[in-house]
Image (cartoon, rainbow, N blue to C red):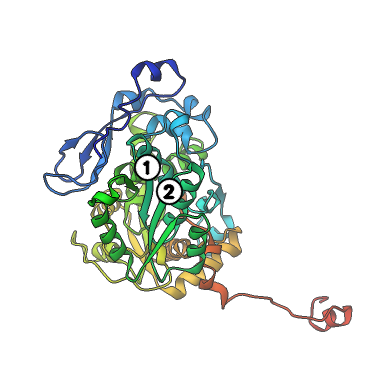
């Protein structure tokens, strides 16, 4: 697959429409800086480092707040800052984004936070996780590159999103998951009718297989969103940074707490903040912003490296209930370390009991029912405050990336009816419901 993204769209077509020009100019290696055209490629031929999208800074600098605010009520309001989807007719999308930024004063009070605390609740996306953002961008790019089947390796939420996007677009899909995923995530993928392949192994085993499949002739026309079109996929995460800044009145929060699996979400939110400052859409906080990462104790190779003051991330065999974060060999881990260190943040991890307790704490104080990844984030927020790593007097945003109904087993044994009575006033009084 050698098509170049956007090569079939003439400059005249772009100029004659209201669509912004694609600002992406190349793929650039994050390791050695080698540049490649905008093709389906995720690793550098020179040093095998990961590739990411580089942009024409002059094109980005032309974007205004007014342009964005006049856009659609979804991630495509930021199309002028993304590597695909400038023409609405080309989009493969469920139109995710503009999810609630929930004020959390009761949660703040319980944790001893005195500054404004917000929960960015991405469970409100169409398939109830932030993955709809990255998939919309990746598959829009994939369509432009000529692919005719969509695929992924997934810990659950990505599988949901790829299958749903493919169904909406009328394109075949094939998604690969570990066989021991939560039943809720298996069902909410299979229901869309694409091929679902359960692998007897970990996510890292699944990802390795997909990396091999993408090199075969049989999968030449298949876009694996987190393999061969990964650079475009990763850019979709930036919209979580753009949105928070816009929803705060074009202001970057002083602190953010972000769950980590591969570590890419954290790096891209940080990148989004940097881009907004560089092109003049926002001003950085007086003391900059700090990025904090959250992992499960059952899969914490990035946080462990930070705690051990090393750049060496030792792969682990994941365990624990936070399966959506169970990537034992995180591809962007070293870049997440760099972002956290550069901004003066930190990383924490939480065990299963702390995760369950945090899921209930968040629900009780904000009305947001998070999946286990959200429990990890809130549990780590609590630990960061208690340790003094996170400033309780600085405005903070925590990211909830998925819906609790997908991982209901995590808390099913801990919650239930507080009363059980017969249907009579006498029984209600005897149970203490009348004081």
Residue 316: horizontal and vertical position, in percent? 26, 70
Q: Which mark is residue 82?
A: none
Relative to 327, is 86 on the left or the right? right
Question: Residue under circle 2?
Answer: 172
Is 114 situated above or below 359?
Answer: above
Q: How many marks?
A: 2
Residue 407: horizontal and vertical position, in percent? 51, 67
Residue 222: horizontal and vertical position, in percent? 33, 47
Question: Residue under circle 1?
Answer: 148
Q: Label 1: how many residues lie within 10 Å, few (<14), some (14-19) or many (20+)?
A: some
Residue 119: in sight, yes or no?
Answer: no
Relative to 211, is 109 on the left or the right? right
**Mark 1 or mark 2, which is nearer the start of the sequence?**
1
Residue 413: in sight, yes or no?
Answer: yes
Labelled pair 2, 1 in contact (Cβ < 8 Å)? yes
Relative to 33, is 201 on the left or the right? right
In depth, the one of 66 and 80 nearer the eye is 80
Residue 151: horizontal and vertical position, in percent? 37, 51
Determine the residue positioned at 43% across, 15% down: 16
Determine the residue positioned at 50% across, 55% down: 193
């Amino acid at each position: 697959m050698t098509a170049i993204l956007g090569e079939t769209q003439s400059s005249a077509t772009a100029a004659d429409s209201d669509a912004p020009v694609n600002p992406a100019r190349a793929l650039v290696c994050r390791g050695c800086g080698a540049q490649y055209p905008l093709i389906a490629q995720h690793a550098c031929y020179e040093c095998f480092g990961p590739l990411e999208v580089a942009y024409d800074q002059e094109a980005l600098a032309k974007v205004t707040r007014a342009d964005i605010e006049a856009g659609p009520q979804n991630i495509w309001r930021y199309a002028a800052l993304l590597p695909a989807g400038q023409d609405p007719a080309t989009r493969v999308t469920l139109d995710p984004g503009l999810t609630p930024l929930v004020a959390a004063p009761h949660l703040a009070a319980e944790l001893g936070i005195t500054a404004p605390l917000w929960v960015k609740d991405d469970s409100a996306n169409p398939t109830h996780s932030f993955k709809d953002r990255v998939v919309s961008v990746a598959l829009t790019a994939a369509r432009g590159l000529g692919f005719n089947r969509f695929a992924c390796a997934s810990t659950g939420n990505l599988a949901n999103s790829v299958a749903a996007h493919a169904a909406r677009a009328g394109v075949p899909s094939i998604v690969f998951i570990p066989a021991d995923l939560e039943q809720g995530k298996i069902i909410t993928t299979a229901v869309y009718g694409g091929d679902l392949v359960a692998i007897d192994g970990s996510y890292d085993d699944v990802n390795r297989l997909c990396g091999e499949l993408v090199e075969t002739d049989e999968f030449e026309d298949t876009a694996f969103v987190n393999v061969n079109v990964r650079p475009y996929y990763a850019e979709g995460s930036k919209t979580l940074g753009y949105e928070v800044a816009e929803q705060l009145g074009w202001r970057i929060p002083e602190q953010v707490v972000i769950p980590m699996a591969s570590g890419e979400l954290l790096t891209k939110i940080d990148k989004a903040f940097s881009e907004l400052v560089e092109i003049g859409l926002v001003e950085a906080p007086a003391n900059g912003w700090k990025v904090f990462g959250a992992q499960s104790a059952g899969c914490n190779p990035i946080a462990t490296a930070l705690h051990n003051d090393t750049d060496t991330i030792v792969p682990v065999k994941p365990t624990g209930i936070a399966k959506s974060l169970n990537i034992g060999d995180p591809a962007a881990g070293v870049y997440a370390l760099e972002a956290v260190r550069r901004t003066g943040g930190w990383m924490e991890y939480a065990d299963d009991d702390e995760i369950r307790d945090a899921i209930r704490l968040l629900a009780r104080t904000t009305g947001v029912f998070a999946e286990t990844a959200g429990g990890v984030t809130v549990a780590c927020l609590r630990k960061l405050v208690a340790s003094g790593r996170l400033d309780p007097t600085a405005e903070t945003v925590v990211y909830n990336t998925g819906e609790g109904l997908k991982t209901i087993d995590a808390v099913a044994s801990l919650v239930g009816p507080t009363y059980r009575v017969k249907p009579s006033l006498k029984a209600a009084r005897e149970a203490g419901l009348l004081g």
